[in-house]
Image (cartoon, grey):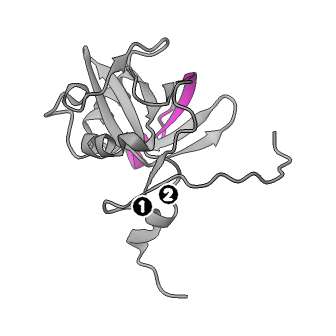
Amino acid sequence: MKNLPLAKVYQLLEPGPVVLLTTARKGRANVMTMSWHMMVEFEPPLVACVVSNADYSFAALRATKQCVIAIPAAHLAQKVVDVGNCSGRDVAKFEKFGLTPLKAARVAAPLVAECFANFECKVADSRLVNKYNLFILEVVQAWTDPGQRHPKTIHHHGYGKFVVDGEAIRLKSRMR
């Protein structure tokens, strides 16, 4: 074994696909790129996510307690990276990157039409926000685009390196 610098641990323990998180506050929608998230409960579906207090979306999420997690397929990778490389303080990201906001059913934040799945979320627990910027979100409505069959997601491995989902395998499981 060889020593691994602690700053590189996250590159190997990446929790899931890169997603877009949308918020809406005071009539203004925003979208950010997020890769620090994980499922913490099956039903109701709970998702833990870190949104830095330096991110423009942080204040909107904290104030409104609502957002949408939109899952982009690999063909959107460059847009996803571009969205993550600028701030909503300075840029109207939906317009700049050609993303289409759609009205959500249960939250004010918009869905992203180009994404193959959208999860409307409400903050279920904010006790770790002050210490870790960690929000626990409950998915209250979920949508998929049946026109996007077998989408491949992108995963961030740090410093501009991404991988795309590979071959799917099925193994016997006793879980439901």
* Left-right relation of 113 to 85: right
> In this rendering, does residue 165 appear at all?
yes
Whether 86 is drawn above or below 168: the answer is above
In-image side of 12 versus 98 (left or right): right
Give the mark, 2 or 1, whose residue is nearer the N terminus. Answer: 2
**Label placed on residue 157:** 1
Question: In the image, what residue occupies the spot 36% across and 45% down?
Answer: 77
Horizontal and vertical percent for residue 153? Answer: 49, 45
Task: Give the quarter of the figure containing the N terminus.
Answer: bottom right
On residue 62, the disc is none
Left or right: 22 in relation to 172: left
Distance from the alpha carbon under mark 2 to that under mark 1: 7 Å
Q: Which residue is mark 2?
A: 14
Q: Check disc 2 and give the amino acid type.
A: Glu
Q: Quadrant of residue 73?
A: top left
Q: Are marks 2 and 1 in contact (CB under 8 Å)?
A: yes
- The residue drawn where x is 31% and y is 31% is 31
Secondary structure found at label 2 = loop
Whether residue 50 can be seen here? no
Give the extent of the magenta segment. 125-143
The percent position of residue 109, horizontal first and vertical second, equals 38, 20
Q: Is 141 a magenta residue?
A: yes
Query: Quadrant of the image for the C terminus?
Result: top right
In the rendered image, the vertical position of residue 150 relative to residue 11, given as above or below: above
- Could you say where residue 161 lies in the image, as x and y percent from the top left? 36, 61
Q: Amino acid at mark 1?
A: His
